[in-house]
Amino acid sequence: MLPGYACDKELDLINVFEGWQAGGDSLAVLEEMACPGAGSCAGLFTANTMACLTEAMGLSLSGCATTHAVDARKMRIAKRSGMKIMDLIQGGLSARRIVTRKALENAIRVDMAIGGSTNTVLHIPAIASEFDIDLSLNEFDRLSRETPHLVNLRPGGPYHMLDLDRAGGVPAVLSRLKPYLNLEVLTVAGRTMGDELANFKPANPEINSRVIASLESPVHSEGGIAILYGSLAPEGSVVKPTAVSTNMLKHAGPAVVFNSEEESMAGIVGGKVKPGDVVVIRYEGPKGGPGMRETLAPTAAIAGAGLSESVALITDGRFSGGTRGPCIGHVSPEAAVGGPIAFVTDGDMISVDIPGRRLNLLVEQEELDRRKAAWRAPEPKIKVGVLARYRSSVTSASKGSVLR
């Protein structure tokens, strides 16, 4: 989607979500102007992130990910894609020859370089699982530590997808990352990634150098995803550090606990959350939901209330790709299966250390053992039908929330 324009700035959907909580006369203008037409969101949120990673792993034609919905190039790419599908079938080049561990590593590196959605830590392992590739959370953290953040897109930065498209899109990012990539992998073009990039030249060199930083002078020295472990997340949790202000990379505060997204919204809007607090939203994980609802409303409400510089949020659920601030999701094991997040009570001190990759509940083990012994799993919200079957067979978020 093209970005909207009002209030003397470019806009996207997140401006509306955050503007709703902030209130004021501009909300009606934001609602009218922020989303001006067809397409997925204008920033680097989940749909656009996954489009970029699809291209980066070789599964879509060059330029497909960032060409906008209203651009005539989209129609031309659609036609070429249909023709290419027929070529691939006739040539016997299947997805299993393209999606390899090395191709997935390329996609993750692009994810780190562009500062993509935290939902990729669910989607990429789930894709890997379909191709019989075991991809752990530690791979994301390893590649993030090695790969610099080069493109500062919304929600963490000032640029929109339109800027990245004008800068050359995913091929431009891949070209910048060449020293880090597996260039021998195949793409749907029938050529290797290296061959695809050999003749790439950006159409707008000035915008290219402005929007996509160099390896020598990146936006951040590390990539856009961090995996945190600790007493609150023994199996891991995920955060987007490139969308967190430096003063909130480390934070400790008292827990304010909610047992659903609805409870959290009532509490945040009702003024229950104060500067310095750590909001905990639980029973929103794969089994607890069931499914992992996108908790954009609570995170946007915190940002809209001006608390994203002083309040952290922790959940066993997931976020929108448009979430910004110290928001830590996918906490595993989740509350519904008796993970430590189930035993947090109001006022417990929680420590967040993103650079140190730690998420700890500062409660004595003896007390936690007592709470665990007293805990009883809540009654499932849905007991019959497809969602009940899903709940019984879905794995942890740390495994991609796939069905087993």
Image (tube, rainbow, N blue to C red):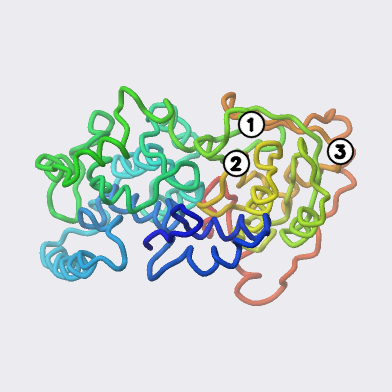
Q: Earlier in the sequence, mark 3 or mark 1?
A: 1
Q: Are marks 1 and 2 in contact (CB under 8 Å)?
A: yes
| Classed neighbour count for the residue bearing mark 1: other residues with Cα under 10 Å, few (<14), some (14–19), many (≥20) | some
State whether residue 392 appears in this view: no
47 versus 185 height, above or below: below
Left or right, 234 with respect to 256, comes to: left
**3 or 2: tag closer to the N-terminus:** 2
Q: What residue is pinned by disc 2?
A: 325
What residue is pinned by disc 3?
Answer: 347
Q: Which amino acid, by three-letter code, is at mark 3?
A: Gly
Q: Quadrant of residue 236?
A: top right
Of 315 and 32, nearer the camera is 32
Q: Tell whether 103 sits left or right of 372.
A: left
Residue positioned 46% across, 47% down in the render: 154
Examine the image and state in which quarter residue 180 appears.
Answer: top left
- Secondary structure category for the residue under label 2: loop
Question: Which residue corresponds to the image point at 21% horizontal and 70% vertical from the top-left?
Answer: 75
Q: Residue furthest bottom?
A: 385
- Residue 309 x/y as whole percent: 66, 37
Q: Which residue is label 1 attached to?
A: 248
